[in-house]
């Protein structure tokens, strides 16, 4: 009875198309497990083997990986949100109206917005906890100095990403929270007015600020963050993987 | 003639191998890669990553289903809420704004701190304690001491500031301080307190715990984390209308606009 599906499976596995997709057998041997990791574009970020202590959750808290995972979720939910959003303060299609529509008209729109919002808060927390873990385990020490610097930048970019996204609903909460930041930017020594003019697009918070924050939030900062993440991961591999007792 | 040790080049390839000798070992990264005590990424690490990703997906989904993201009225520049607060992760900076010049609190202090943080590995260059939480038992004691020191210190300073301001500090400074209410209260005193307390913390841990570079770095970093958290908590849950200080359970909730300045 089971011979027929077994035969079909066997035929599929040896077919020309299957072998063009997968260049190794089922990963139940050392060889195939290795091939599964380094012939897969998503998995080849990993080495084939890791030190056993790198698997210890009480050591890593999984916070670096989870920060990246939240970044992916934010990219996905953020892209979906972009289909429904116009970075405009008034007119028929405007930011606030779009958020209202998300909450009331779009199927699962509220859920989508909620996931994006809470994942954004979550990422600030996980990145902060990751930084704490790395510091207290001394994982910034040679040869990982530069990767710690990249990590510091990533923390800064996470805050910037979250902050630029905060303005986008264009409600009272967003407007006045970002106004606090605007006042801080204006108080920058020596170049306060010029700096805030460039970042916020004017001498008060208005349509230009919304558009600039939108572009920074959906294009500029994610690209910069993705670029830094790539370097960060690359350096983890090149610097000998996750730290452990010497 | 003794036989050379180690793997030998194949015939005809001696030259290529000799070229490699020009790359000094110090110029490439020396990493500690031992083959023993390793695990295959497939399945051991991937299983953990998969489970963690699933649990977080489910958790996020449940939170998103249970709690709606806030949405208030349409933005109105004429109606300033009292208080206006930054997002929670920047409330520490907003809290700092209440105690010193805006540019100092919002730009200079975070810039100096981020620069210092990035410079940590270039100050503490030893390889001591890599992969061990707090490096040693001494490091753990220093962490606890610094956390208590910074938490108590920050709370005390916030309370002292509130107390002094309630008792005419600004008016007194305007009249009697050189430079009025700006120079000393907004610049010199806060800068002095921030640098002074950091230096004091380092001196104490060096004296009490004979701290080395790694250990006083732990003290400073722990102090930062504690200050960051205290400022966030105070800014989030203890500031009410007018950004006045309240106990967390007695913060009045207001949704009124501030009177426009006429």
Image: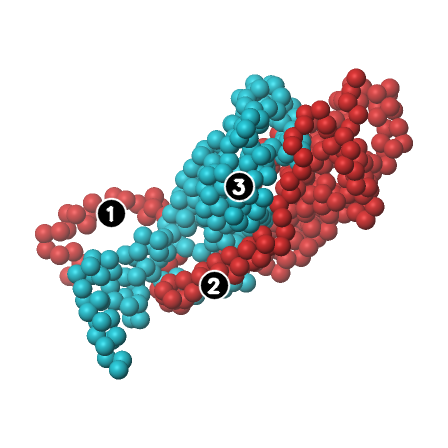
Q: Provide the residue designation for mark 3.
A: A158
Image quarter of residue A27? bottom left
Residue B51, label in figure: 2
Q: Are marks 2 and 3 on the same chain?
A: no
Tint of chain B: red
Q: CA distance from mark 1 to mark 3?
A: 43 Å
Tell me the SS state at disc 1: loop
Q: Residue at x 53, y 59 (%)?
A: B58
Q: Residue at x 57, y 26 (%)?
A: A90
Give residue B128's position: percent from left, percent from top: 51, 54
Residue B21, label in figure: 1
The disc numbered 2 marks a residue on which chain?
B
Give residue A222's position: percent from left, percent from top: 46, 38
Pick whichever, A223 or B141, lies toward us.
Answer: A223
Badge nearest the viewer, 2 or 1: 2
Tell me the SS state at disc 2: helix
Q: Residue at x 48, y 46 (%)?
A: A77
> Within 10 angstroms of label 3, few (less than 14), some, or many (20 or more) residues?
many
Image quarter of residue B220? top right
Tint of chain A: cyan
The disc numbered 3 marks a residue on which chain?
A
């Amino acid at each position: 009875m089971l011979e027929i599906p077994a035969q079909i499976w066997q035929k599929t596995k040896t077919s020309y198309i299957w072998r063009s997709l997968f260049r190794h057998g089922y990963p139940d041997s050392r060889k195939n497990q290795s091939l599964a990791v380094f012939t897969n574009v998503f998995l080849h970020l990993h080495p084939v083997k890791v030190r056993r202590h790198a698997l210890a959750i009480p050591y890593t808290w999984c916070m670096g990986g989870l920060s990246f995972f939240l970044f992916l979720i934010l990219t996905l939910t953020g892209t979906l949100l972009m289909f429904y959003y116009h970075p405009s303060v008034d007119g028929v299609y405007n930011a606030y109206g779009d958020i209202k529509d998300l909450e009331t008209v779009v199927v699962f729109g509220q859920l989508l917005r909620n996931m994006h919002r809470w994942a954004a808060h979550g990422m600030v927390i996980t990145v902060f906890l990751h930084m704490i873990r790395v510091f207290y385990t001394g994982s910034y020490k040679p040869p990982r100095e530069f990767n710690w610097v990249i990590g510091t930048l990533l923390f800064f970019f996470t805050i910037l990403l979250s902050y630029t996204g905060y303005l986008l609903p264009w409600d009272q909460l967003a407007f006045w929270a970002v106004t606090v930041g605007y006042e801080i930017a204006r108080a920058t020594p020596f170049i306060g007015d010029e700096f805030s003019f460039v970042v916020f697009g004017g001498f008060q918070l208005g349509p230009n600020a919304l558009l600039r924050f939108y572009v920074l939030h959906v294009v500029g900062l994610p690209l910069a963050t993705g670029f830094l993440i790539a370097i960060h991961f690359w350096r983890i591999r090149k610097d000998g993987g996750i730290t452990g007792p010497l | 003639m003794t036989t050379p040790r180690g793997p030998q080049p194949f015939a005809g390839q001696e030259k290529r191998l000799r070229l490699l000798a020009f790359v000094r070992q110090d110029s490439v990264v020396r990493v500690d890669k031992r083959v023993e005590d390793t695990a295959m990424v497939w399945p051991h690490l991937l299983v953990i990553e998969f489970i963690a990703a699933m649990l977080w997906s489910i958790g996020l989904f449940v939170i998103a289903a249970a709690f709606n993201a806030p949405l208030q009225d349409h933005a109105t520049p004429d109606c300033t809420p009292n208080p206006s607060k930054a997002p929670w992760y920047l409330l520490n900076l907003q809290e700092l704004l209440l105690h010193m010049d805006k540019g100092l609190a919002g730009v200079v202090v975070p810039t100096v701190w981020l620069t210092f943080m990035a410079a940590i590995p270039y100050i503490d260059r030893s390889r001591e304690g890599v992969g061990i939480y707090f490096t040693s038992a001494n490091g753990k004691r220093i962490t606890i001491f610094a956390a208590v020191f910074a938490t108590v210190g920050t709370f005390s300073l916030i309370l002292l500031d509130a107390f002094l301001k309630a008792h005419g500090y600004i008016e007194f400074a305007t009249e009697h301080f050189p430079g009025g209410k700006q120079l000393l209260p907004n610049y010199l005193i806060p800068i002095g307190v921030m640098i002074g307390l950091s230096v004091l913390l380092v001196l104490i841990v060096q004296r009490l715990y004979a701290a080395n570079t790694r250990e006083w770095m732990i003290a400073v970093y722990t102090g930062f984390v504690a200050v960051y958290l205290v400022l966030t908590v105070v800014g989030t849950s203890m500031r009410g209308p007018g950004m006045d200080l309240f106990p967390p359970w007695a913060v009045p909730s207001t949704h009124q606009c501030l009177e426009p300045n006429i």
